[in-house]
Image: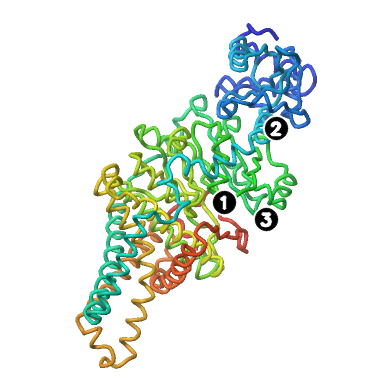
Amino acid sequence: MSLGVTQDQAQLEVTDALVQRGVLTPEQRDWALDVHERTGSPVESILVASGLVKRQFLYWLLGELWKSPYIDLTRERLDTSLLTGLDPDRLVGEGWLPVCRLSTDEVLVASPRPPSDELLGAIGSTLGYQVAYAVTTDWDIRYALQRCFRDVVLDRAALGLWQRSEVQSARRILFTGQKVFLALAAILVVAALAMRPVVTIQVISVVIGLAFLASVAFKFTVCMAGARLERHEPVTDSDVSALRDEDLPTYTVLVPLFREARVIGDLIENLAQLDYPPDKLDILLLLEESDTETVDAVRAAQAPPTMTVILVPRGTPQTKPKACNVGLFFARGDFLVIYDAEDRPDPDQLKRALVAFGRGDERQVCVQAALNYWNVAENILTRMFTVEYSYWFDYMLPGLDALRLPIPLGGTSNHFRTDGLRKLGGWDPFNVTEDADLGIRAAAMGYSVGVVNSTTYEEANRAVGNWIRQRSRWIKGYMQTVLVHTRHPLSLARTAGIRRTLGFMLLIAGTPVTFLLVLPMYVVFAASMLIPSGAYARFFPGWVLYLGLVNLIAGNSLMIYVCMMGAFKRGRYKLVGWALLNPLYWILHSIAAYKALWQLITRPHYWEKTVHGLSGLTAVPHQHQPGVDAD
C-alpha cells in the first residue's frame, strides 16, 4: 500500500485482502464498509470490535499492505533510554513508541497508524533520528506504555493532584489554620461549661436541634425544587434517535475492579448492552496488580475486543480514585464515564449524556445519571436503600441542578468531558468519597455539573455490616471534603459565590453533622420519656425539650415525606409505606457516622471495601421503567 492512497481506497484494500485470504466473506466486507461510511470509523476498528477479525492478525496483514514489518511489543525488549525526555501523554494520544536503535542514526518506531509522511516526519523531528517504521496493535501500544511508564503513571495517579495543588488534596487532613480554629473552639466550649454549665448545655441543645432542622429543611427545599421539574423530560427518546452514528465521538468507559471476580460475567454482559457503536467504545477494565483472582476471572471470561485490561501499579493509597486516575491517563475518548462492577446502565445512557452535554455550555464538565437498585424487594435494608436513593437522584440532584448549587457526584455513572476532567486534576486518591469531592471541586473552580434522565441499576446492600462499612466510608469522605474545601473559605466564596458556598456547607457539612446528631437527640428524647423531669429539669427545662421535640418531629416528617415522593415517582408504590421507617434507618446512619469520625482520626485514607454479588435475586431487566411497580 502506497502512502498516497485515499482513506476510502485504504479501507477497501484492507477488506479485499481479508476476503482474498478467506477471513471475511464478501457480505461481511460490504457490511464493514457500510459501517465505515455511516460512522466514519476506521474499518480495522470496526472489524476488531465486531469480532470478525482477530486484532493481531489484522495488524499483521496491515503491515504487509503498508510494506512494514509487524512487531509484537509484548515479546519485544524495549530500549527505555529512547523514552528519556518524551511526553507520555503525547505517546498515548498519538499512539506510537520507539522500540530500539537500528544504527547510530536510525530508530525503529512501532505504531498502529498508517505510516504517512506527516507522521514519520513528526516522529523523526521529536526523536532526532531517522525513523524505521513497524506496525503493531493499539493494544500492544497501551501494554508497552503501561510497562515503560509504570512509575510515571503511579506517581501521577497517586500524587498528581497533591503536587499540583496541595490545598485541593485530602492527603493532609488538617492545615495549621484549621487546627488552631478547632483548638480555640474546644477551649471556648470547655471554658463555657466550667463557668456556666447550665446555660452552656441549654445553648448546645438548642444549637443541635436547630442545626438538625436546618440541614433537613435545606434538603426538603431542594427536593421541592427538583419536584417542580417532575414532568419535564430533559432528554427524550426522539433526541437520542436524532443522533447520527457518524457524529458520535469516541467514549471511554472506566470500570475500576477490586476483588470482583464473582461478578465479571455479569459485568461483561451488562456493558455489552450499551447502545453505542462498538468501534467507538474504549472500555478500560482497571484491575489491581495484586488482585490476581479478578485478573484471572477477566482472562477466563474472554472479554470482547472492545475491552482493554489496565493493570493498576501497586502503591499507596490503594483506592478506587487512584485506579480511575490510571484509567484517565490511558483514556482516548472525548467523553468518559465511570461504571462500577455491578452496574446495569440504561442502554442509551451514553447517547443521552451526549445530548445533555450538547445543551450545556463549555463550563459544564460533567452530567450525572441517576442510580437505583434492582434487588429492591430482598429485605428491609434493600427497601430502605432504594427509597433513599430514589429521592436523592430523582429529586435532590435535579433540585440542586435547578438551583445552580454544587452537585456531589455519585460513585458511578458520572459522564465527563475528558479534557475538562484532566483540567480539574482527576480524582483525589486520598479522599474516600472522591466523587462528591470532584463535584464540589468543579464548582469551586467555576465549572458546572448537570444531571441526565437516565438510570443505572445497581445491587442494593443487603447486609447490615456491609452497609455500615460502605456508608461510613461515604460519610468519612464527606467529612474529608468539608475539611479540604474550607481551608480557604473566603477564596471558595469568591470563586463559587456565597449562595453556592452556603449550599455546599448545608449539604456536604450538614449531612454528616445531621447523622452525628441523630443518636444524641434520640437519647435525650427517650430519656425525657422515661426519667422523671425533676432529674434533668435544671439542664433541660420544658422549653428546651419542646423545641428539641418539634425539631425532631419536623425533621423526620420532612424526610419521610420526600422519601415517599421518591418511591412514588419511581413507580414503586409498595415502598411508599416503608418510608415511615426512615427514623430507624437513620440510627444506622448515625452509627456509621461515628465510625466515620473515628476513622477520620485514626485511619483517614483507609478504603472500606464494599462486597458485591451478595444478592440472591436476579437483576431486573433493562426495560424496567419508572411507573412500573417492581416491588
Disc 2 crowd, CA 10 A, few/some/many (<14, 14-19, 20+): few
Query: Which element is circle 3 on?
Result: helix
Residue under pointer 3 = 262
Type of amino acid at the residue the image marks with label 2? Gly
Q: Residue at x 30, y 66 (%)?
A: 185
Residue under pointer 2 = 51
- Measured from the top left, where is residue 83 in percent x and y? 64, 26
Query: Which element is circle 2 on?
Result: loop
In the rendered image, the quadrant that contains the N terminus is: top right
N-terminal label among 2 and 3: 2
**Residue farthest toward the left in the current orientation of the protein:** 543
Q: Tell me which corner region of the image, top left, top right, bottom left or bottom right, holds residue 597.
A: bottom left
Residue under pointer 1 = 317
- Depth check, front residue: 541 or 131: 131
- Depth check, front residue: 82 or 522: 82
Type of amino acid at the residue the image marks with label 3? Arg
Q: Is residue 430 above or below residue 388?
A: above
- Measured from the top left, where is residue 159 in percent x and y? 52, 43
Residue 549 visible in the picture: no
Disc 1 crowd, CA 10 A, few/some/many (<14, 14-19, 20+): some
Type of amino acid at the residue the image marks with label 1? Pro
Query: Which element is circle 1 on?
Result: loop
Q: Tell me which corner region of the image, top left, top right, bottom left or bottom right, holds residue 157.
A: top right
- Measured from the top left, where is residue 499 in percent x and y? 25, 49
